Image (cartoon, rainbow, N blue to C red):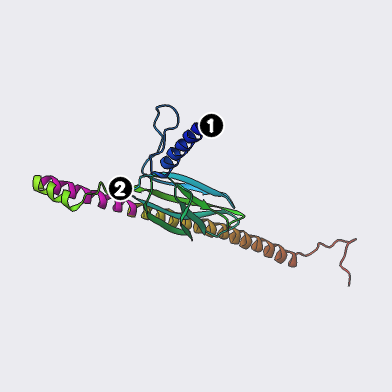
Amino acid sequence: MFPLLVGAGLVVLNLVSSARSQKMEPLSGSGDQPLFRGADRYDFAIVILPGGTECFWQFAHQTGYFYFSYEVQRTLGMSHDRHISATAHTPQGFLIETSQNVRGQINFHTQETGFYQLCLKNQQNHFGSVQVYLNFGVFYEGPEMDHKQKSERKQLNDTLDAIEESTRKVQRNIFHMWRYYNFARMRKMADFFLLQSNYNYVNRWSIAQSLVIVLSGVLQLYFLKRLFNVPMTTDTKKPRC
């Protein structure tokens, strides 16, 4: 009886190990409800506290193009260092690439299906927060076919192939145009915050210098008035020789 139990246990272990080694779709959370995977692209801004870390997870299939770009728009607090650290990890937790700059990109082809981890670290600023604009997602160019299948389909219907190829080309151009648009938005917001900071800086110093000028004028007038102040003389109060 004991050898039979041992054999059954080995069979179960082999099945489990083979299932883990295969690249599978993620399981659902509970019951028959599908797992929430989110959208294929995101763009938003986030504030990272001093010395803090923010991580995000993006689902991607095996045959996709993953893109991740960021830019520090402004700093909040005493520190004015805009450099941050960005990292990308595989679903298994392995490091893909690291970027340490004010703005940067991490692009790669997804080799496995799962949730990829993106982390931003504000470790260089211990006394100031940073506002970072993010743009990341996955792009799929469509199913790949070998040359034989393409030639067979071309013989069957050349018009359909031409329309499909044109649609893919338009979709690819729209995607790249959308990315360039997001880059322009990043730079526009960073320039806007820089101009706003310079505007507030100039206004504060102008007000301070105007107050100093007015105060110095009042003090000069006061001391000049005291120089020409002649004391009144009476019979009991006369100036001494």
| Crowd rating for badge 1 (residues with CA inside 10 Å; few <14, some 14–19, many 20+) | few
Q: Position of residue 9 (x, y in %)?
A: 49, 35
Contact (Cβ within 8 Å) of mark 1 with mark 2: no
Membership of 155 in magenta stretch: no
Element under label 2?
A: loop
Element under label 1?
A: helix
Residue located beneath label 1 in the image: 2
- C-alpha distance separating marks 1 and 2: 52 Å
Give the amino acid at mark 2: Tyr
Q: Quadrant of the C terminus?
A: bottom right
Say the numbered circle drawn on residue 140. Answer: 2
Give the amino acid at mark 1: Phe
Q: Position of residue 2 (x, y in %)?
A: 53, 31
Residue 35 left/right relative to 166: right
Residue 230 left/right relative to 207: right
Q: Position of residue 88 (x, y in %)?
A: 46, 52
Membership of 168 in magenta stretch: yes
User: Residue at the location (41% across, 52% down)?
Assistant: 68
Is any atom of residue 105 visible in this view? yes
